[in-house]
Image (tube, grey):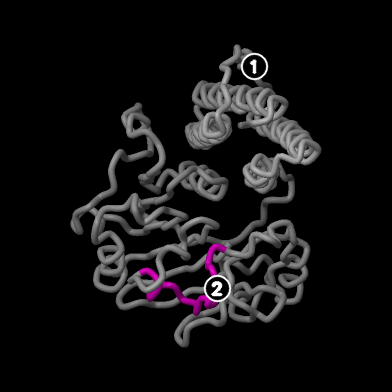
C-alpha cells in the first residue's frame, strides 16, 4: 500500500500537471488569436505531454492501492503582452514545477518510499529537459546571419515520435514556421482525434504504403516504440532512402531509438557503430554536462559553421550550453562524415552518410 502522505502529495501533483496542461492550452489559444500557428502547435504538444505526466502519477497511486482524488483545476491566464511574454511565463512555470517535483522527491526520501523515488526520478530528469526547452526559445543569443539557398518548391516532411518530448516540440515549432515546408506528424501515443482538428499537422495513422511514404522528401525518425509502427515500416523507410533517394534524420532517444532497433534495417542506416551496451544512453550520468566538439569536417559544413573563421567557430561552439545525455557510440562507419563528437574519446554524436540514392543524418542525443 502507498504511504498516505505520499498519496496526498502525488494527488496534488496530478492537479498541478493538469493545471499545466490547461495553461499550455490557453497559451495555444492565445497564439492562434495572434496568427502564430507554429507556436500554437508547440504549446499543444506541451499540453499533451502534461496530460501524460498526470496520467503517470495517477497510475502510480492506483497501482499501489491508493485513491486518486480529482480536485478543482484553477483557471489559467489567457492574455499576455507578446509571444516572448508567453514563453517567459512558460519558463517560469516550468521552474515552479521543478520545485514541486523536488519537494515531492524530498518527501519520498524522508518517508523511505523507494517506489515513489524510482518513479519520481523520471520526473526529475524530465524537468531538466522541460526548462531547457522553454529557455532555449527565449534565449536572446539564438540568432546568427548566414547565406541560404532559396528553394522554389515546398518540402514534404514527416515527423515520427511516440510522445511529444521536448526535441519533438522544438523541431516541430521551427518547421511549422517555414511556409515552404508541408509538415505531417505521426505521434503514436496521442489520441487520433487530435489529428482531426482544423489545420492540425498531426496524422491519425502512419502512411503504410510505399507510395505515400515515398511522397515525402524528409523523414525525421524520433524515439518511437517499434510496436507502434505497422509491419514492414523499417524496411519501407530503408527503401525510401536507398531506392527513393529520400533523406532521413534519426533523432536518438532514451527509450527506444536506437536500443529497440538492434539487428534491423534501421541499424544499418545509422552512420555510426553503436557501442555493445544498452543503447538508450547512460542514465546514471544524465545530469553530467557534455560539451560537444565540432570536427574539421563539421567546420566545412554551412549548417554547422557558426563563423567564417574556423577558430572563431570553434570558440563559439565551445561556449554553447552543454547537453546532458548521448547514445554511446564507437566510431563513424567508413563512408560517414562526423560533424560533432563527445569530448571523451571523439565518439560521434552527429554524423551523416550516403546510403544508396539517399542520405541519413544521425543525431545521437
Q: Is residue 174 left or right of residue 88?
A: left
> Which of 290 and 201 lies nearest the eye of the viewer?
290
Disc 2 element: loop
Quadrant in the picture for residue 244:
bottom left
The residue beneath circle 2 is: 277
Q: Is residue 218 left or right of residue 136?
A: left
Q: Nearer the viewer, mark 2 or mark 1?
A: 2
Asked if 155 appears above or below 137 in the picture, the reply is: below
Q: Name which residue lies at 64% across and 59% down.
A: 283
> Which of 122 and 126 lies nearest the eye of the viewer?
122
Residues in magenta, as a range: 266-280
Q: Quadrant of the N terminus?
A: top right
Q: Position of residue 237 (x, y in %)?
A: 30, 63
Q: Name which residue lies at 56% across and 35% down.
A: 60
Q: Residues within 10 Å of mark 2 (few under 14, many from 20)?
A: few
Q: Position of residue 109 (x, y in %)?
A: 77, 41
Q: Position of residue 331 (x, y in %)?
A: 55, 82
Q: Name which residue lies at 39% across and 72% down.
A: 359
Question: Label 2 to label 1, Cα distance in Å?
Answer: 47 Å
Quadrant in the picture for residue 348:
bottom right
Q: Residues within 10 Å of mark 1 (few under 14, many from 20)?
A: few
Q: Is residue 94 left or right of residue 56?
A: right
Residue located farthest toward the front when viewing the structure as drawn: 1
Q: Name which residue lies at 67% across and 32% down.
A: 90
Q: Is residue 242 left or right of residue 95?
A: left
Asked if 241 appears above or below 161 in the picture, the reply is: below
The residue beneath circle 1 is: 77
Amino acid at each position: 500500500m502507498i504511504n498516505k502522505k505520499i498519496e496526498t502529495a502525488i494527488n496534488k501533483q496530478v492537479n498541478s500537471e493538469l493545471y499545466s496542461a490547461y495553461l499550455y492550452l490557453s497559451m495555444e489559444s492565445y497564439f492562434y488569436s495572434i496568427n502564430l500557428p507554429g507556436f500554437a502547435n508547440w504549446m499543444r504538444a506541451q499540453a499533451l505531454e502534461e496530460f501524460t505526466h498526470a496520467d503517470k502519477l495517477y497510475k502510480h497511486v492506483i497501482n499501489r492501492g491508493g485513491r486518486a482524488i480529482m480536485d478543482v483545476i484553477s483557471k489559467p491566464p489567457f492574455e499576455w503582452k507578446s509571444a516572448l511574454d508567453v514563453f517567459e511565463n512558460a519558463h517560469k512555470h516550468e521552474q515552479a514545477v521543478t520545485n514541486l517535483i523536488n519537494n515531492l522527491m524530498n518527501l519520498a526520501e524522508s518517508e523511505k518510499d523507494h517506489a515513489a523515488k524510482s518513479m519520481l526520478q523520471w520526473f526529475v530528469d524530465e524537468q531538466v529537459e522541460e526548462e531547457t526547452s522553454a529557455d532555449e526559445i527565449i534565449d536572446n543569443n539564438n540568432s546568427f546571419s548566414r547565406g541560404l539557398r532559396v528553394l522554389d518548391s515546398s518540402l514534404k516532411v514527416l515527423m515520427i515520435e511516440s510522445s511529444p518530448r521536448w526535441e519533438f516540440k522544438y523541431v516541430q515549432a521551427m518547421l511549422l514556421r517555414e511556409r515552404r515546408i508541408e509538415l505531417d506528424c505521426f505521434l503514436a501515443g496521442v489520441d487520433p482525434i487530435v489529428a482531426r482538428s482544423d489545420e492540425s499537422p498531426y496524422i491519425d495513422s502512419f502512411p503504410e504504403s510505399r507510395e505515400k511514404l515515398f511522397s515525402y522528401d524528409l523523414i525525421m525518425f524520433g524515439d518511437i516504440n517499434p510496436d507502434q509502427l505497422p509491419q514492414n515500416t523499417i524496411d519501407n523507410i530503408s527503401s525510401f532512402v536507398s531506392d527513393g533517394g529520400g533523406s532521413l534524420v534519426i533523432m536518438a532517444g532514451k527509450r527506444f531509438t536506437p536500443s529497440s532497433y538492434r539487428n534491423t534495417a534501421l541499424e544499418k542506416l545509422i552512420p555510426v557503430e553503436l557501442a555493445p551496451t544498452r543503447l538508450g544512453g547512460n542514465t546514471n550520468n544524465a545530469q553530467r554536462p557534455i560539451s560537444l566538439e565540432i570536427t574539421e569536417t563539421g567546420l566545412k559544413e554551412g549548417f554547422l559553421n557558426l563563423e567564417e573563421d574556423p577558430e572563431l567557430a570553434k570558440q563559439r561552439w565551445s561556449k554553447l550550453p552543454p547537453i546532458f545525455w548521448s547514445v554511446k557510440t564507437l566510431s563513424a562507419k567508413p563512408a560517414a562524415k562526423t560533424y560533432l563528437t563527445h569530448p571523451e574519446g571523439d565518439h560521434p554524436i552527429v554524423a551523416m552518410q550516403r546510403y544508396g540514392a539517399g542520405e541519413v543524418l544521425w543525431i545521437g542525443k
